Amino acid sequence: VISLLDGDDPTTLANIRPPKNPEFEEFYAVHFQPLTVQIFAYTMNLAVAQDIVQEAFCRGLARWKKVTASEDPVAWVRRAAWDLVSRRYRRGVPRTPGAVRLSANQLAMARALSTLPPAQRRAVILHYLADLPASEIARQEDVAESAVMSWLNRGRTALAAQLDEYGERS
Amino acid sequence: MTDRHDDEMLAGAFESFWGEVAPHVSAAGTGAAHATVRRWRWVRVTVALALAALAVAAPVTAYATISGDPHGPPVRLGQPQNIAPVLGGSGASASATDPAPDATGTPDQAPATATGDSSAHPTSGAAGTPSSGAPARCRTAQLSAELDLFDWPGQIGAEAEGEIGLTNTGSRSCVITGYIGARLIDADGQEAPTTLVREDTPPPASLVLAPGRTAWALISWWFTPSGGEQYTSPLCGGKMFGLWVTAPGESTSIRLGGQIGTVCWHHQLFVSPVTLDRPSRSRALAP
């Protein structure tokens, strides 16, 4: 499913060309959606998440040889995307509309996630949505594995408590 | 309740979160990605100091001569005039209300030294601390400037970035601290009203610039319109073609050419404090 993002420059229409790089094509097709859902879980803004992930892929494409030579190209793009998140959010929340209509359960999840401190939130998202082991998360975050373990434990406990509470109320 | 229980419950919760969100995701596509990358250009413009200094510093010298007091009081740093470049409202030429000693040609004998954050917070009005041994603040006359626009993100992202380098072309070390000033130049060569937003990371630090060394400031901007700019034509006031750059604490500017492109959110530029590390070599860009 390929569609243009809302709000793009109309000249984008001129840019649809036959695939140039089949390897990138496949890489993009497989990983765009999962990465976007991960970033969305953090930003809760789908337009911003799509935008950031697209930019991360572009950065990867611009140095594609280097990325494919690295031991884990997905990790490269994921890390680029998360770096973009922290840079963009350092100056406050972008005022781009990008809300997604979610069910009550997912709203509860979103609300619970948003109460976690950023490091815990990232760790929990990377663990459950990106399926990364603590060692991988530690590498992406540039911290010791023990720090990730503690973020995960605290994040898990806080999240579970909030979701339980919600479950009991409803 | 056990950790194990939490873990299973959360795994299930995230799985349904995934299931609900994923169908909403729409990708701009690899065609757009290729197009973006094609558009990325490195623009490297280095301006020889001699030209810039001649164009900008000459009026200052003239003024200093007219006002006739080359032995006036030491330069006071952090004067209100230093705010002007930050707000982007001042004219391109120097405001020489308080001629600096180096306007008479002796940059290294400037009696004042930038201390700490005086240039990082120009509104503080703090005076420089005289100290004969320490390097003096970097003056415009001993700096050359360059502008590198990163070769991304083209038009799919929302943010474009570049870095401004200030190189010490003098023969002595000097100190540079805090934020540069920058004002955009439009297609007609006129200054465009520019809003500068200072980023506070990394925290401003005093850097000693040895001769030949360069201090870098990251600049970035959004090239997608704000709500009120959706229907502006040309978009966001048109493309920008250069910058007037003012070194921290200085009141004279150096003109840098080069196509900047569209700067939305009412010509808003984000600037980071100067660092010795090149922002383009930082982790975000090259893990």
Image (cartoon, coloured by chain):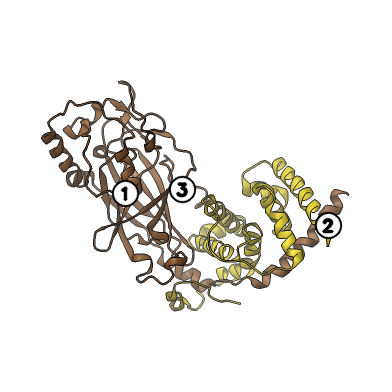
Point out which mark residue B281 bears: 3
Compare residues A144 and B55 and report the one nearer the observer: B55
* Residue with the mark numbered 1: B146
* Residue B248 image-quadrant placement: top left
Q: Nearer the viewer, mark 2 or mark 1?
A: 2
* Residue A144 image-quadrant placement: top right
Residue name at image x 24 percent, y 63 percent: B188
* Colour used to depict chain B in the structure image: brown
B166 versus B150 height, above or below:
above
Dot 2, crowdedness within 10 Å: few (<14), some or many (≥20)? few
Residue name at image x 42 percent, y 75 percent: A11
What kind of residue is marked 3? Arg
Point out which mark residue B155 bears: none
CB atoms of marks 2 and 1 within 8 Å: no
Indicate the chain on which mark 1 is placed: B
Tags 2 and 1 on a common chain: yes
Residue furthest right as drawn: B1
What kind of residue is marked 1? Glu
B99 versus A71 height, above or below:
above
